[in-house]
Image (cartoon, helix red, strand yellow):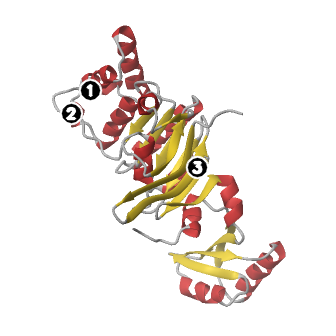
C-alpha cells in the first residue's frame, strides 16, 4: 500500500486559551489538489505552517512522503514548497537575481542551478520580466515570481496559502492553469483560498475547517452527494416581475426551504422527486409567475461550505 504524500494525524495547536487546531486529521495523495477551506481563524494557516515545519504542534504529527515534520524537519523541507499569503521581494534584485538567490539557498549549484532558474522562470511566464526589478512587478506577476521561487527545488508537495488573493480575473485564470499543469506532473497541492468557485474548479478534494476542527473532508463528488439531501433549484422570473411575489409563493409550497433572492433570480432547496418538482412548476405557472428559467443545480464548493459550517469564528 502506497504511503500518502501528506498525512496529518491528530494535530493540536493552541495559542494561550485559543485552540487554533483541534484533533485534525486528513491525508492526500500524489497528484491530488486539495482545497483547504474555512472562515477566518479556522486554523488553516496554522496547519499549513506546521506542515511547512515553521511551527510545532502541541500534539499530533504531520508526515510528508512518510517523513515526520517533527522528527526530520530538514528532510521534509526538501520535499515541500511553501508559498505564504504574503510576498515581500528583496530590493535591489531583478527577477533572475531573486530566483538565483533562492536557488543557492536551496543548495543548487553550477549548471543545475542556472537551468532550474531558467526553467521555473519560463514555466511561470517570467521570461519577459527577467531583468525587471523584483519589487516593481504587478500583483499578478509578483505571485508568479513567488510561485517560481517555491518550485526551484522541485518539491513533491506545494503548500499554497491564499495564492490568488488580490489577483485580477485574468491573473487568477492564468494562475489556476499553472496549478493544473503542476498537478498533471504529479505534484500534490494543498491550497487555501476564500475564492470558493474558482477553488472548486481547481481541486478534486477538499478539507473544510471550522474553529480548528475538521467539519468534512473527501472528494468534492462524495461531499456533494452527502450534502444534497435536498435539491438546489434556481428560478428566474421575467425582468420587471416582482421577485418578492415569487418568494412569497415558494415559501408556501411543500418541500421548499432556504429561499434566497438575487435580483430576478431565486435559489431554494427542494425535497421531492421529479414528479413533485414538476407539480411545483405547474403551480408556479398557475399562480401567475412569469418564469424564464427553472433548473436544478449541483452543489458547488460554496454550497458545501455554507451547508457544512455555521459561521463560528474564533
Question: 39 or 197, which is in the foreground?
Answer: 39
Nearer to us: label 3 or label 1: 3
Q: What secondary structure is found at the residue carrying circle 2?
A: loop
First-in-chain label (3 vs 2) = 3
**Image vertical order of residue 25 relative to residue 52, above or below:** below
Q: What secondary structure is found at the residue carrying circle 3?
A: strand
Q: Which mark is residue 26?
A: 3
Q: Which mark is residue 255?
A: none
Residue 15 percent across, percent down from the top left: 35, 59
First-in-chain label (3 vs 1) = 3
Question: 302 or 242, which is in the foreground?
Answer: 302
**Image vertical order of residue 93 relative to residue 211, above or below:** above
Q: Which quadrant does the C terminus fall into? A: bottom left
Query: Which residue position is annotated with label 2?
Result: 90
Residue 163 visible (yes or no) = no
**Image vertical order of residue 205 relative to residue 211, above or below:** above
Q: Is 10 on the left or on the right of 2, as rendered?
A: left
Q: Which quadrant does the N terminus fall into? A: top right
First-in-chain label (1 vs 2) = 2
Question: 276 or 55, which is in the foreground?
Answer: 55
Asked if disc 3 and disc 2 are in contact, CB closer than 8 Å, the reply is no
Q: Is 48 on the left or on the right of 184, as rendered?
A: left
Residue at 71%, 72% (x, y): give it: 230
Amino acid at each position: 500500500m502506497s504511503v500518502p504524500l501528506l498525512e496529518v494525524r491528530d494535530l493540536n495547536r493552541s495559542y494561550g486559551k485559543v485552540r487554533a487546531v483541534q484533533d485534525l486529521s486528513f491525508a492526500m495523495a500524489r497528484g491530488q489538489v486539495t482545497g483547504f477551506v474555512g472562515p477566518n481563524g479556522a486554523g488553516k494557516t496554522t496547519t499549513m505552517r506546521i506542515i511547512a515545519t515553521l511551527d510545532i504542534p502541541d500534539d499530533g504529527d504531520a508526515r510528508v512522503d512518510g517523513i515526520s515534520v517533527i522528527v526530520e524537519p530538514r528532510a521534509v523541507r526538501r520535499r515541500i514548497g511553501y508559498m505564504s499569503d504574503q510576498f515581500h521581494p528583496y530590493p535591489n534584485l531583478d527577477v533572475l537575481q531573486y530566483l538565483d538567490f533562492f536557488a543557492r539557498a536551496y543548495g543548487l549549484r553550477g549548471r543545475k542551478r542556472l537551468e532550474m532558474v531558467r526553467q521555473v522562470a519560463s514555466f511561470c511566464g517570467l521570461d519577459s520580466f527577467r531583468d525587471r526589478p523584483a519589487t516593481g512587478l504587478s500583483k499578478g506577476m509578483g505571485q508568479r515570481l513567488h510561485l517560481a521561487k517555491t518550485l526551484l527545488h522541485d518539491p513533491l508537495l506545494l503548500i499554497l496559502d491564499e495564492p490568488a488573493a488580490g489577483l485580477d480575473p485574468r491573473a487568477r485564470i492564468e494562475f489556476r492553469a499553472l496549478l493544473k499543469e503542476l498537478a498533471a506532473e504529479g505534484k500534490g497541492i494543498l491550497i487555501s483560498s476564500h475564492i470558493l468557485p474558482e477553488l472548486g474548479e481547481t481541486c478534486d478534494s477538499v478539507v473544510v475547517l471550522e474553529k480548528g476542527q475538521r467539519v468534512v473532508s473527501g472528494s468534492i463528488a462524495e461531499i456533494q452527494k452527502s450534502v444534497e439531501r435536498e435539491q438546489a433549484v434556481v428560478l428566474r422570473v421575467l425582468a420587471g416581475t416582482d421577485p418578492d411575489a415569487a418568494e412569497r409563493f415558494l415559501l408556501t409550497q411543500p418541500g421548499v426551504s432556504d429561499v434566497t433572492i438575487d435580483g430576478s433570480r431565486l435559489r431554494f432547496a427542494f425535497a421531492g422527486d421529479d414528479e413533485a418538482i414538476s407539480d411545483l412548476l405547474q403551480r408556479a405557472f398557475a399562480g401567475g409567475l412569469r418564469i424564464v428559467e427553472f433548473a436544478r443545480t449541483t452543489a458547488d464548493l460554496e454550497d458545501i461550505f455554507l451547508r457544512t459550517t455555521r459561521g463560528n469564528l474564533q
